[in-house]
Image: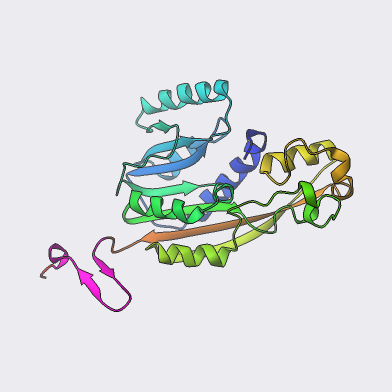
Amino acid sequence: MSTSLSWLQAEIYQRMLEKLEPIKLQPKAILIGPDFPGLRIGQFSRRFPKAKIDTVADPHLSLNQVMWLRMHRALGALFGRGRLFGQRPSDLENHYGLIVSALEFQQFERPHDLLEIAYRQICEDGLLCFSYLGPDTGKELRASLKASPYIKSLPGALDMHDIGDALVQKGFSDPVMDMEYLYLEYESETNYLRDALAIGLVQPGTPPDALSGALRAKRMTLEIVYGHAWVLGKNLSKSDGKTAYIRPDAIKRK
C-alpha cells in the first residue's frame, strides 16, 4: 500500500490496539509491520511497557522516509525499543510474544505463507494479531463495466473464513475473526483515483475518463478484516490426521 494512505494504516493500528486492550498478554518481544513515519510506536510501548518492539519498514517508503525512520527508530533503540528491519526477519524462531500486522496480507499472492512464517517466529503462548483489506474493498469500481479492463484484484483479499481455516491448518489455536466496513467519501475524482491507485485497485497509468462512471459516486468501500490467534502447545506433538507423535522430552511427570 502506498504511503499516501499511511493515515489509514495508522487508524487501523489504533483500532487493533484497542482490540488488544482486554487481552492479558505481556510479551518480552513484539514485531510490528509495516512501519512508517506516521506509526505511533509509543502507544504500543505504553500498552506493553516490558516489551522490546521490533518493526519492519513499509516497502513503499521513499529513500528519505526510510532514512528518517531509521534514525528515529535508532533513537528509540537507545531506550530499549528494539530494531528496524528492512524486511521480515526469517531467522528469529520462537522469539516474539506478539506479532502485529496491519493492512498487509491483501498485498500477497499467498498470505498463508505469512501465517507460516509468523507461527515459526511466535513463542509458546504468543499471539498473532492482524488486519487486512477484504474482498468487498473497492466494490464500486468493479460495478462499472467500462472500468473493468483497468481494475486490479487484491491478491490476498480473501474471505475471513478462509483465513480462519488457514490459521488452524498452520497450527494456530482459538482463531477469532471479525470485520467492519469503512466508507471513504471524496470531493474530487482525482483524489479518489489517487487512493484507488495507492490501495492497488486500479492499473497504474489508467486514464481518468475510463473510470469516470465508477468515480462519479465519489465513495469507496473498505472491508477491514481483523483476526487474532494463539500459539499453544507448540512442538509438543505432531499428527498425520490419524496418529499423534509426542517428543519424549515433552512428557513430564507431576
Can residue 42 be seen?
A: yes
Q: Is residue 184 left or right of residue 4?
A: right
Measured as percent of width and height from the top left, residue 128 is found at: 43, 54
Q: Which residues are magenta?
A: 235-251
Q: Is residue 86 above or below residue 19?
A: above
In magenta stretch: residue 225: no
The quadrant in which residue 134 appears is bottom right
Q: Is residue 239 above or below residue 107?
A: below
Viewed as shown, does residue 92 lie left or right of 36?
left
For the residue pair 247 and 252, the one nearer the viewer reads as 247
- x, y (%) of residue 119? 37, 54
Q: Quadrant of the C terminus?
A: bottom left
**Image: 25 above or below 210:** below
Q: Nearer the viewer, residue 105 or 241?
A: 241
Position of residue 48 measured from the top left corner of the image (x, y, whole percent): 40, 44
Q: Nearer the viewer, residue 30 or 103?
A: 103
Q: For residue 240: magenta?
A: yes
Compare residues 180 and 60 and report the one nearer the observer. 60
The picture quadrant where one finds residue 211 is top right
Q: Residue at x 39, y 57 (%)?
A: 24
Q: Residue at x 58, y 54 (%)?
A: 156
Residue lying at the far bottom of the rendered structure: 242
